[in-house]
Amino acid sequence: MKKNICIILISLSVASAMAAETYISNIYGRSYQILNGKWDAIVDLYDAGHQAKIYLNKKAIGETDFYEYSFENGLRLNVPGDWNSQSPELKYYEGTVWYSRHFNAVSNDKHRYFLYFCGVSYRCNIYLNGELIGSHEGSFTPFQIEVTGKLKQGDNNLIVEVNNHRQQDAIPALSFDWWNYGGITRDVMLVTLPQTYISDYFIQLDKHQANIIHAEISLSNEKAGETITLRIPDLAISVKMKTNNLGKASKSFKVSKLQRWSPASPRLYDIEIESNTDKVCERIGFRNIESEGNKILLNGKEIFLRSISFHEEIPQRMGRACTPSDAEFLLSEAKVLGVNMVRLAHYQQNEYIVRRAEEMGIILWQEIPVWQTIDFSNQETLVKAQNMLRETIKRDRNRCADCFWGIANETRPSKTRNHFLDELLQTGKSIDTTRLFVGAFDNVYFQQSSQCFEMHDEFIDKLDMIGVNKYMGWYAAWPLSPEKCIWKVAEKKPLFISEFGGEALYGQAGDETIASSWSEDYQAKLYRDNLTMFKGIPNLVGISPWVLFDFRSPTRFHPQNQEGWNRKGLVSDQGQRKKAWYIIHNFYQQMKQKYQE
Ligand code: GCU
């Protein structure tokens, strides 16, 4: 199986170089034809499609020729959407599915045309009218392929070969604790842009100053001397800048009466960027996020991060979240819990979720799925991780809600791991120095010698905030009673409990001291005990219970209590709140008052 994939996929570095040249930020602010809807599909269990040249989409014409495939009158799948929740036969399917659709195009030589994919899980080849035009690897980040000069006037046939086989050199790798949804899981568009368009921009408040905005704007072509105008009408700002010979312009300017974005007042400003041939409108918020000693400051004020994590999944549908109403559903449930932050686990989630969070005043931690056992010694895997981080940051670096970039979850210290994460950190910092880089670590242990919880991982010194996943009362037994637990972990750094919790089947009562009761009572007591212990962490800046909703996981086998669900949710798969939900809700009310947010 692996051999085929390697031959067909355009090499990653080529694919990413092409993407960089033609980058398009703020896709929803551009002119596009949406290609969502019902697509024809063929399930290709043995990857025989290449041999059969399915991508040519041939039709029998003569008397003797015939084709052992057809996209017509067969399986149809929704795009966007995972295939697993759309047909019982595909619930557990991991393999290749060929998608096909036709669309009409009327192109001219005054414009450039791109196919833009917001997310395809996991790897894919893209064919237009029978020609392989591009590839991508990674389920959770967008990519675009230029089709200028490749479009036919009128009917075009777009075929997408999607494969979600798990592989050791992939990210995530062979095993992970969420459902391996496959398919074209996010929006697809045909984008029309001027010959020279505004390809990318980064407009942010200075890291420390409250009244200085830095703007970097790039044109798609290396044109010098082009005038670019940036307007922020509500701040009476209109600044002009000239492009250099790389087609890039930048300017820093003072602003007055700026209302900085925060959970309490998620102020966004309308922004207009205009060049000689293009104009893009945007909504951007401005805020300062810093770590100072072992504190996190938002707009110069200490903040306690009241967080929750969720997967990009609608439990009631047992499928990927992919629409604005899905985003509303997930974020509203988080908001009512009392959060001012969400950890989007364990991968970049769709833009509807990120932009809606920003409007709702919810801080975001976004990460790439460097989850546990990644092939850290594999150079190709490192390149994949760097591409994913680049694609993640570039898509959302104008989103003020995004305050934390996560580069790893539960990876064990080793020379190869440290090198891998070092490279990733450099990649991230080369694109964005305004945000905080973080990771989630699960190697905090109770030391008999010091009777304290300690962590020995040299890599954490390089991060701005340390996330700790610690499951006291579930994966780890209490060495002492919670109020006696002292933590001496990364004391000079801000420490964030990025995961804690335990499983409970909604509606199940039981002994609060017995884990195998799988009861709400046990989960509730576990939460009370952990909150007690957290008081003993001097550098604690926030917590993120694992997890908002019960979620699908093929590694959860208990027939009565799990049935393929990770039951650590505070809310069940049917949307019912468990007893622990109320404990966190109350705690967050208290913290909100304490920090006068
Ligand atoms: C880990 C991991 C999660 C997982 C959780 C669990 O900490 O980061 O992805 O779901 O544990 O075991 O429930």
Image (tube, grey):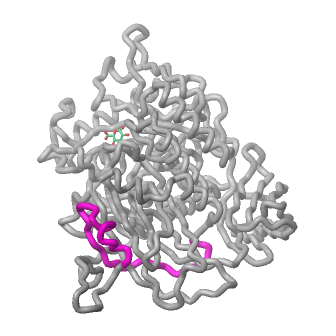
- Boundaries of the magenta span: 28-56
Nearest the eye: 36 or 486: 36
Q: Position of residue 341 (x, y in %)?
A: 51, 49
Q: Position of residue 50 (x, y in %)?
A: 33, 66
Residue occupying image coordinates x 33% and y 73%: 54
Q: Quadrant of residue 557?
A: top left
Nearest the eye: 1 or 574: 1
Q: Position of residue 154 (x, y in %)?
A: 50, 91
Residue sitting at the far top: 449
Q: Quadrant of residue 286?
A: bottom right
Residue occupying image coordinates x 22% and y 69%: 87
Q: Can residue 364 be seen?
A: no
Using the image, determine if residue 570 lies above or below residue 517.
below
Q: Is residue 323 left or right of residue 264?
A: left
Nearest the eye: 357 or 460: 460
Using the image, determine if residue 113 lies above or below residue 590.
below
Q: Can residue 378 be seen?
A: yes
Q: Is residue 357 left or right of residue 509?
A: right
Q: Is residue 224 left or right of residue 220?
A: right
Q: Is residue 558 left or right of residue 362?
A: left
Residue sitting at the far front: 64
Q: Position of residue 464 (x, y in %)?
A: 60, 35
Residue occupying image coordinates x 83% and y 61%: 245
Residue sitting at the far left: 560
Number of numbered discs: 0
Quadrant field for ligand 1: top left
Whether residue 212 appears in magenta in the rendering, the answer is no
Whether residue 35 appears in magenta in the rendering, the answer is yes
